[in-house]
Image: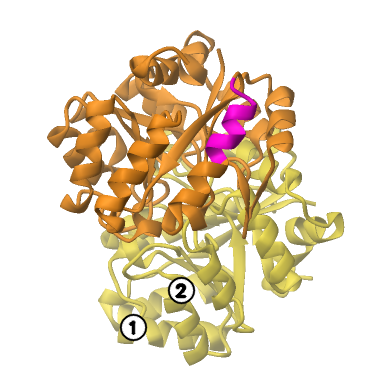
Amino acid sequence: MNIDAYCVLGTDREYDLTADGLLRALDQAEVERAVIAPVDRYLAVDNRIGNDFVLQAAASQPRRFIPACSVNPWYGSAALAEMRLAVGAGARLLVLHPMLQGFIANDELIWPLLDAAAAEKLPVYLHTGPPGNASPWQVTDLANRYPQLDLIMGHCGATDYWNDVNEATLAASNIYLESSLGRPFTFVPRLAIVGAERGLMGSFAPVNALAFEWEQMRLALPPDIVPAVCGENLRRLLEKRGPL
Amino acid sequence: MIVDCHTHWGSVWTEQDGDDPRNWLAVLDRHSVDKAFLFGYENLHRLDHCREDNDRLARVVQHSGGRLIAFGSAWPQTGPASLEEVRHCVQDLGFPALKFHPWIQGFSTADETFGQICGLAGELGAPILLHDGTPCYTMPEQIAGLARRFPRTRFVLGHSGLLWSWRSALEAARQPNVWLCLCGPHMRAIELICHRADPNRLLWGSDFGFGFADSVRYRLAIIKQANIDPALRDQILGINPFRLLDLA
């Protein structure tokens, strides 16, 4: 099964992806399913609006969309409650965006959320790459602190931390690399070093064109690891909570 | 006509091919790219190799049949010698422009000697392309600051803010002497930049050549598939590069 590891559903600033548009793009790319996450605004504030929107969209397409939720850790106990609410309603992934949500990735501020995510066997996707507060080694700190938690390094630290990604990933067995913005020509050589079982193909539609990203990735990946990177690795993580 | 405005002659190419760019150019041929602005690698990483690499670039360009246009570099940490290196690149080697990477080279855009280099480049009519998008020395705002201080000098943001600072690059491009090279932002950012920025100051690049990886395929496909006016795409790929260098 092919799964796109990260798409953003909704309309806001540079985002303009509707459910129908995403389905068309998935069909064009011959991808069965996609993780869907809220737009930037609802990562930063009003998390409930974004989470409800994504959960409703996923409920209408349960065979195609896999809902991710997000909460801003600065909301404290309310963030924890919102996360639990969203997970109870079907969210299969927690998204954190240190730059947009205003914290340093390895800040203790998020530990309560990670405690809860670990208890729920919920993978955590961290947007990485923005300098200073979302680096690969910060993800490693979290991975070492929470060895039972699966952490997805969104965008592979692109662009400036490309040097750090391999060593930071090899320092923890529970880090997975999501490809979007990392670009196929740098992502694929990484997998030879960190292991193909760590690779997750994500398009980050609509800021990237979904079908185009899938085409480029399939051109770049060695055929023998296409199934794992293009869906099976992610399915293994997501199904720790039960079948998709 | 397609001109790749951001490429490098990486050390791996020297080790493999000496000064012969035929294999390097074969990658461009694969994607019907006609010409390229060629930057060094050693001259951005090793102060003690700067002159040697500038001279190597001149030889590589000589062997390219007119397809490559070299940008030289210098290290402001060497004081007056860096100004001499700029003159050597422009006046002796015939390079039309300069490339700096303050993050890797380890100097601030506020460096006094670099200011002198920016002034000299303006006098010589040599645009300066800088790596950008990376703190703490190469943010678009810092390069826009240089553009304010040196209005006679053309500055190119070599990455248009990369992935996270492209909105800052758009702000920087409000300075009339700032150009943007679309080499790094994602497709949607490229579309928005093309929609909002001065169409006469946009370029495209692949960052090919640090190693052997073919980054041209992906980055050229992005600009070809992006939802931008076809005439503007043609202008970016084949007209603006010559305008930057006053070769139009």
Residue flagged by tag 2: what amino acid is it? His
Mark 2 residue element: helix
Q: Chain of mark 2?
A: B
Please give the residue where the numbered disc 2 appears in the rendered image: B88
Which residue is label 1 attached to? B110
Q: Nearer the viewer, residue B174 or A134?
A: A134
- Give the colour in which the image draws chain A: orange
Q: Earlier in the sequence, mark 2 or mark 1?
A: 2
Quarter holding residue B195: bottom right
In the rendered structure, the colour chosen for chain B is yellow
Mark 1, secondary structure of its residue: loop
Which is closer to the viewer, label 2 or label 1? 1
Q: Residues within 10 Å of mark 1 (few under 14, many from 20)?
A: few
Marker disc for residue B212 = none
Residue at image coords 22%, 27% = A119
Q: Tell me the distance, in whole angstroms, between the alpha carbons under discs 2 and 1.
A: 23 Å
Q: What is the x, y in percent for residue A137?
A: 22, 43
From the viewer's perspective, tell me whether residue A212 is left or right of residue B206.
Answer: right
Which residue is pictured at 58% across the width and 79% down the height? B154
Q: Quadrant of residue B80?
A: bottom left
Q: Main secondary structure of the magenta part?
A: helix
Q: Horizontal placement of A128 versus A225: left or right?
A: left
Residue A137 shows up from this direction: no
Q: Position of residue B194 (x, y in %)?
A: 71, 63
- Residue B211 on the magenta segment: no
Which segment is the magenta one? A54-62
Q: Name the residue rendered at 33%, 19% in the picture.
A: A195
**Disc 1 residue type?**
Ala
User: Viewed as shown, does residue A179 lie left or right of B36?
Assistant: left
Badge 2, how many Cα within 10 Å: few under 14, some, many 20+?
Answer: some
